[in-house]
Image (tube, rainbow, N blue to C red):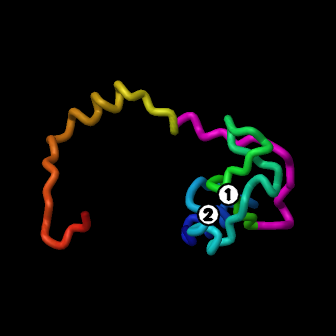
């Protein structure tokens, strides 16, 4: 995460948004996006979405604007195409090994 945030700064981004566990990401400076009136698509603006967070990388270039975040189109997967793609790989067998957690 540190590498990615540094890369974003290098590329001139003023903020990074992420979805995930707030308890984990807050140690990297992430906070609720709703604080900046940036909401996750499909959710009511009045509902808190703790999993949707923002980290301001550059306060001087960050322009606070109310808005809706939409996942990139590439996040949408065609399940049939995925199934066909997966068929190209050998079937894996689930193994249980010594010391493996239940």
In the rendered view, would you say 96 is above or below 99?
above
Of circles 1 and 2, which is in front?
2
In the rendered view, would you say 86 is above or below 12?
above
Taken as a whole, is the magenta stretch helix, strand or loop? loop
Q: Which residues are magenta?
A: 58-74
Q: Secondary structure at mark 2?
A: helix
Residue at 67% of width from left, 60% of height from top? 11
In the rendered view, would you say 36 is above or below 99?
above
Q: To which residue does mark 2 refer?
A: 22
Image x and y of residue 51, in percent: 62, 54
Query: Would residue 102 be visible to someone looking at this image?
Result: yes
Whether label 1 touches label 2, CB < 8 Å: yes
Q: In which quadrant of the rendered view does residue 63 lie?
A: bottom right
Image x and y of residue 22, in percent: 61, 63
Q: To which residue does mark 1 refer?
A: 53
Badge count:
2
């Amino acid at each position: 995460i540190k590498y990615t945030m540094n890369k974003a700064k290098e590329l001139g981004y003023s903020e990074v948004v992420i979805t995930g566990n707030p308890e984990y990401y807050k140690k990297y400076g992430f906070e609720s996006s709703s604080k900046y009136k940036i909401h996750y698509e499909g959710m009511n603006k009045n509902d808190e979405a703790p999993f949707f967070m923002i980290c301001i990388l550059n306060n001087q270039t960050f322009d606070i604007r109310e808005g809706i975040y939409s996942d990139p189109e590439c996040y949408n997967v065609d399940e049939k195409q995925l199934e066909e793609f997966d068929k190209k790989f050998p079937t894996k067998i689930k193994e249980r090994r010594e010391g493996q957690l239940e």
